[in-house]
């Protein structure tokens, strides 16, 4: 079953989640403000209370309803449960005398006596317990408003992931989506794979149907993502990705790339067994960009459930024609493999040696004790593997670069130096010297390594030739694994860093590569959460304020431009400064920013800068400003934000001669 993407706004209101929309708008308004509630006689109350709540039944007593308070800017609560019972608890529960519909009201009040109320008609029904998923469509109804709050590991906090081996939480996509305005996105980033995890209550020994929609790009040689159900009661507490995978009681591997512009619906049936708490756990290894949306769970009819079928494959390092297939099926007792070349097997996890390179579809059919079967297949191109890699160093002058081919198992390589010149050779692992006669600029160098069977692998790097290099300026992962290695937060002293990170890493970066090439998808960038913002003058309201600092040496007396891209909402600012000198202590750098001695200060808003990519609002913009390097040549980049969640990317220092010549 397929469904075309809906680009228009569609808001799906579910009774169990009613009230969430009442709390969304204030999140960003107060992001950088003091959260202390006003007292009597204070200034005008700009954050009046807003009442909201959700509810769910107790699986052991379906007449008992548990209420979760979602009200904002309130300190006192009065509940009317619609059956004559009341409460003043923040998160109460109520046991009803009979099944039926009840009008439940919560009155939320702040210290100024200002009130807000909301009423929801709830249904107290008899029958199998109906699980409730939070943020099932990733629309941003939770505490931070970004659609990911309930989808983190159980004890996740904003300071980082709690599981020692946990992947980063998934990104949020604005397009394409299947419903509403947002979807979950697993990035195509092998060095930063993503995942989602949410626990919820079920009834023991009950059949359920999980449904979701997904779309997957078609640019990967090994496209897949897994959506699973983890038995938390039987296997928990779950405190790592390893434990989550070991506790899987049902799963489905998705790999349909036939039409990346169309969402496909997928279902997964499971029995809860002895579990009263389970979790949805989805992930891939960063191999392909995957979007997921609109999760739902329904009570399924009684009866046997087919097995969950899945497997992975691994090519031998010794013989590229040999593959090992690892069976990951759940609740199956017999297996039949079809390797796509006329050979079969009934082993659980077989190894198969193909006769030649080619395109093969491998299919696994699994059967359980109830006689029910299911199958799963993957198609892959069997080739001799090859990995492209290279290093480079400055040669006789700044325009001469020595490139060294470090590819493995390549039969030949092809160089593209990014300036219109290319070079192919069968002399692999050799050093090639190239002179850039086009003058200063950014050049993207690509090395394509080709195997003995024609399989190709590429590596690309953008070089700043004759241009000052801002390390980690594109916020992509580096050889050290983190672009933040090049940026210091404000709480540094010498080489010692004791405070917060300089920014949060984000997959919602600019729609341009560092060399200015437009791209259809977001790159990585830096994020400043609203709670980490500076004051309007750049000073710090608390110790958690995020600043990014990097030292550079420029040609004394020469003119340059500071340039960066940014994305922020109306009323917020992304600021970039060039400080005069290097600073051994972060407090001195902050003082230099505040004393007006900056060589240039840029404040990017929605009303200035040049639009530089993205169709979502607000759009990415680019801003630049000229400055003259001091006599010492020593300068420092200083980045910060004010007013609410903001993003920045592609920070550059450009010689004025390049910019002014355009």
Image (cartoon, helix red, strand yellow):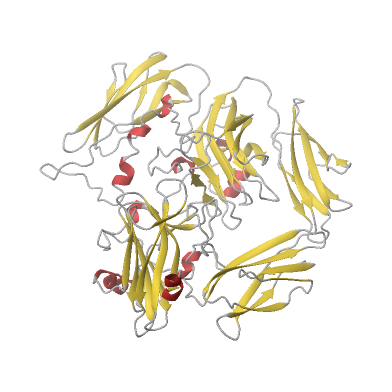
649 w.r.t. 61: above or below: below
Position in image of residue 196 (x %, y %) = 53, 44
Instruction: Specify the quadrant of the image occupied by residue 360.
Output: top right
Residue 448 or residue 271, whichever sits in front: 448
Point 29% across, 50% down: residue: 571
Position in image of residue 183 (x %, y %) = 51, 40
Residue sitting farthest toward the front: 661
336 w.r.t. 507: above or below: above
Q: Is residue 528 visible?
A: no
131 w.r.t. 591: above or below: above
Q: Is residue 648 visible?
A: yes
The quarter of the image holding the N terminus is top right
Residue 171 or residue 457, whichever sits in front: 457
Left or right of 585? Residue 509 is right
Position in image of residue 433 (x %, y %) = 66, 80
Left or right of 351? Residue 116 is left
Instruction: Specify the quadrant of the image occupied by residue 550.
Output: bottom left
312 w.r.t. 514: above or below: above
Point 78% across, 60% down: residue: 317
Residue sitting farthest toward the left: 41
Left or right of 336? Residue 36 is left
């Amino acid at each position: 079953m397929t469904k075309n993407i809906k680009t228009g706004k569609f808001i799906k209101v579910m009774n169990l989640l009613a009230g969430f929309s009442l709390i969304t708008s204030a999140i960003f308004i107060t992001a950088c403000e003091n959260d202390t509630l006003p007292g009597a006689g204070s200034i005008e109350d700009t954050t009046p209370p807003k009442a909201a709540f959700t509810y769910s039944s107790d699986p052991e007593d379906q007449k008992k309803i548990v209420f979760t308070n979602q009200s904002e800017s309130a300190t006192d609560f009065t509940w009317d449960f619609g059956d004559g019972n009341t409460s003043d608890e923040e998160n109460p529960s109520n046991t009803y005398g009979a099944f039926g519909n009840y009008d439940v009201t919560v009155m939320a009040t702040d210290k100024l006596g200002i009130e807000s109320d909301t009423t929801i008609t709830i249904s107290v029904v008899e029958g199998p317990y109906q699980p409730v998923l939070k943020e099932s469509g990733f629309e941003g109804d939770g505490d931070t408003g970004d659609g990911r709050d309930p989808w983190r590991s159980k004890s996740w906090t904003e300071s980082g992931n709690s599981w020692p081996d946990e992947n980063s939480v998934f990104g949020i996509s604005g397009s394409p989506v299947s419903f509403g305005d947002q979807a979950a996105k697993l990035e195509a980033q092998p060095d930063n794979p993503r995942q989602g995890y949410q626990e919820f209550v079920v009834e023991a020994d009950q059949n359920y149907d999980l449904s979701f929609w997904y779309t997957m790009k078609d640019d990967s040689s090994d496209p897949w993502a897994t959506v699973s159900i983890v038995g938390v009661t039987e296997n928990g507490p779950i405190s790592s990705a390893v434990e989550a995978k070991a506790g899987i009681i049902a799963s489905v591997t998705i790999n349909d790339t036939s039409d990346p512009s169309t969402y496909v619906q997928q279902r997964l049936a499971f029995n809860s067994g002895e579990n009263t708490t389970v979790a949805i756990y989805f992930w891939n290894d960063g191999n392909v960009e995957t979007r997921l949306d609109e999760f739902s769970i329904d009570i399924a009819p009684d009866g046997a459930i087919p097995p969950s079928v899945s497997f992975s494959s691994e090519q031998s390092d010794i013989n590229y024609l040999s593959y090992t297939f690892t069976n990951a099926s759940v609740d199956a007792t017999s297996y039949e493999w079809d390797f796509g070349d006329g050979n079969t097997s009934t082993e659980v996890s077989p190894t198969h040696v193909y006769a030649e390179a080619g395109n093969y579809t491998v299919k696994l059919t699994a059967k359980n004790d109830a006689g029910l079967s299911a199958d799963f297949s993957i198609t892959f191109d069997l080739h001799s593997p090859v990995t492209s890699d290279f290093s480079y160093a400055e040669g006789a002058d700044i325009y001469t670069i020595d490139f060294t081919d470090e590819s493995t198992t390549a039969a030949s390589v092809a160089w593209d130096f990014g300036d219109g010149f290319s070079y192919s050779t069968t002399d692999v692992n050799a050093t090639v010297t190239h002179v850039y006669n086009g003058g200063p600029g950014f050049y993207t160098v690509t090395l394509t390594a080709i195997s003995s069977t024609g399989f190709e692998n590429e590596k690309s790097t953008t070089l700043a030739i004759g241009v000052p290099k801002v390390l980690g300026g594109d916020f992509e992962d580096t050889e050290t694994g983190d672009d933040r290695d090049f940026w210091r937060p404000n709480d540094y002293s010498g080489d010692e860093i004791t405070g917060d990170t300089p920014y949060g890493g984000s997959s919602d970066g600019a729609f341009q590569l560092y060399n200015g090439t437009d791209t259809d998808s977001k790159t990585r960038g830096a994020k400043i959460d609203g709670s980490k913002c500076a004051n309007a003058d750049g000073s710090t309201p608390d110790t958690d304020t995020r600043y990014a600092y990097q030292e550079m040496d420029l040609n004394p007396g020469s003119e340059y431009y500071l340039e960066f891209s940014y994305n922020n909402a109306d009323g917020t600012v992304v600021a970039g400064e060039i400080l005069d000198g290097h600073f051994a202590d972060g407090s001195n750098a902050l003082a230099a920013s505040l004393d007006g001695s900056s060589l240039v200060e840029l404040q990017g808003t929605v009303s200035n800068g040049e639009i530089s990519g993205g169709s979502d609002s607000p759009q990415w913009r680019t801003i630049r400003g000229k400055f003259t390097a001091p006599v010492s040549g020593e300068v420092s980049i200083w980045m910060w934000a004010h007013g609410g969640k903001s993003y920045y990317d592609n920070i550059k220092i450009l010689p004025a001669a390049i910019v002014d010549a355009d």
